[in-house]
Amino acid sequence: MERGGAQIEDKRQGWSCIRLAVEELSLFRPEEKKMSTLAFLGASNLLLHVLDQIGPTMMVLRQDIQRNIERVEETYMLDPNLYSSLEEIVQKEVVGEGSARQADSCCRSILWLARHRYTSILLLTDIHALGNQSSQTNIF
């Protein structure tokens, strides 16, 4: 009896981690004009952590996100004061270099990271809802 209760508690703990991740990822709004680069990278790294918890099924997605994070980090590290907001990074590539449309541009990395974050929130919200439904109906 105790073993079944421990399994249910472990399952609930996993779902609460997913709920927490959804809440943290939801803190960042795309309508904010001057989003902090470090905050954006922090949320993106949180997404990597969540994918690690899901397992090897998401390895290809995880690698894509990791590479995009690295591109943004590389640009940020060139001048952390100048590139403290994502807007500055985008302006550098759009206005300054004209490299925004290149496949390996930081602009594309930011765009894909934002898309991954948005779709991950939707996915994790659905997973959390399904977990709540199954834990309510499948109590031993």
Image: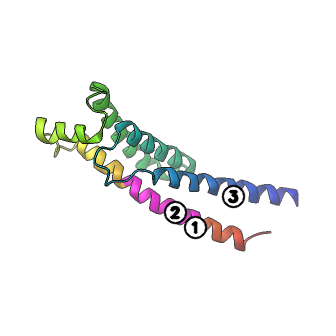
Q: Does any portion of residue 93 appear in the rendered image?
A: yes
Which residue is identified by label 1? 129
Q: Does label 1 or label 3 sit earlier along the sequence?
A: 3
Q: Amino acid at mark 3?
A: Arg
Q: Residue most toward the top?
A: 78
Residue 79 versus residue 53: which sits nearer the camera? Answer: 79
Q: Could you tell me how far apart the alpha carbons at marks 1 and 2 are, in whole angstroms?
A: 6 Å
Q: Amino acid at mark 1?
A: Ala
Percent x, y of residue 21: 53, 51
In the displayed structure, 49 sits above or below 74; it is below
Residue name at image x 47 percent, y 44 percent: 48
Please report contact status of discs 1 and 2: CB closer than 8 Å, yes or no.
yes
Which residue is identified by label 3? 12
Res 31 quadrant in image: bottom left
Taking the magenta stretch, the answer to whether it contains residue 92 is no
From the image, which quarter does the N terminus lie in?
bottom right
Residue name at image x 25 percent, y 42 percent: 87
Which residue is identified by label 2? 125
Percent x, y of residue 85: 30, 38
Categorize mark 1 by other alpha carbons within 10 Å: few (<14), some (14-19), many (20+). Answer: some
Percent x, y of residue 39: 41, 40
